[in-house]
Amino acid sequence: MPPFPAPVKEWHNDTYASIDPSRPELSAKGKKIVITGGGYGIGRGTAIAFAEAGAAGIAILGRKEAPLQETKEFIENKHNIPVSTHVADVTDESAIKKAAKEIGEWHVLDMNAGYFAAPAETMEISADEWWKPFEINIKGSFITAQAFLPNRGKDATLIGVSTGAVNLPAAMLIRTSSYASSKYGLLKVMEILAAEFPDVHVVTIHPGVVETNMLEKSEMAEQLPIDTPELPAHFAVWISSPEAAFVRGKFVSCNWDVDELKKAAKKITETDSLFTTSLVYSPELLA
């Protein structure tokens, strides 16, 4: 039984065969991959996963050079795939535009960089600190998309990273209102980008609950089922493949079993209100 609201019966906390990046169907051969927040945690794992999938090259962005360089050396030594590093904060428009120019054409852009404000109730947090997740999670993603989209290659994939918290009751989110609200807002931004750029496979994912600095900061680690870093990393490879074409413009969790999702592909594609922010109304609701 899934621990959180889910449309599937099987819930994963670890990677599994269907999203294994070594599957020929998920090959990233010939693709240039770009990952923000690529030096740490999930971003680092995702870079490694795309290397395992045979990417032609990987570009990783982050605020600190050291972790980017470590990730670069690890991938190049193990997989013999070129990795470029770009020190840039996603809220720094000029730095992101510079990185986009240096990187050039790309095929997968994973906007992984994010921020979690310290847990606090409304009267315990400053307005500036409460607003910071919006600056990074929404504005930073917009800046990144705006800078990189002009250089997209054929059949490009744009991945937004949200959170499963958007599905939880408000009463459970009182101390994390800024993070949850910013990530919900990102869902709408990504849906609109999907409508505006019909040639791009735009999708938003929940990357699971992985032991990272952000999770530690959330003070929720002991209350949540922990996922392996490989789960969201391998899921990102799958979501960028032709197998996942049916979730374009949607929000999906890395915990959801992809084989169950594929069986419902037609319904997911044809139902606008499924896995989106759509608020569906009809007179029957109040009958």
Image (cartoon, helix red, strand yellow):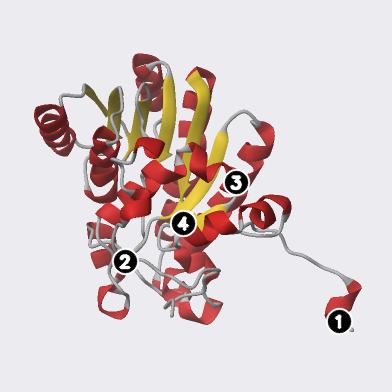
Q: Which mark is residue 258?
A: 4
Quick one: label 3 or label 1, which is nearer the N terminus? Answer: 3
Contact between marks 3 and 2 (CB within 8 A): the answer is no
* Contact, mark 2 vs mark 4 (Cβ under 8 Å): no
- Say which residue appears at 72% left-offset and 51% top-offset: 270
Q: Disc 3 to disc 2, how far (Cα)?
A: 23 Å
Mark 2 lies on a secondary structure that is loop
Q: Residues within 10 Å of mark 1 (few under 14, many from 20)?
A: few
Which quarter shows the C terminus?
bottom right
Front residue of 215 and 281: 281
* Location of residue 248 in the rendering, given as x and y in whole percent from the top left corner: 59, 44
Tell me the residue at 56%/41% (across/down): 245
- Callout 4: helix, strand or loop? helix
* Real-space CA distance between mark 2 and mark 4, rounded to the nearest whole angstrom: 13 Å
For label 1, the residue is: 286
* Residue 231 appearing in the image: yes
Q: Amino acid at mark 3?
A: Phe
- Circles 3 and 1, Cβ within 8 Å, touching? The answer is no
| Nearest to N terminus: mark 1 or mark 2 | 2
Q: Distance from label 3 to label 4 (Cα)?
A: 11 Å
Rendered residue at 45%/39% (across/down): 240
Element marked by disc 3? helix
Asked if marks 3 and 4 touch (Cβ < 8 Å), the reply is no
Looking at the image, tell me whether mark 1 or mark 4 is earlier in sequence order.
4
Q: Which residue is mark 2?
A: 13
Q: Tell me the amino acid under the disc marked 2.
A: Asn
- Residue 246's mark? 3
Mark 1 vs mark 4: in front: 4
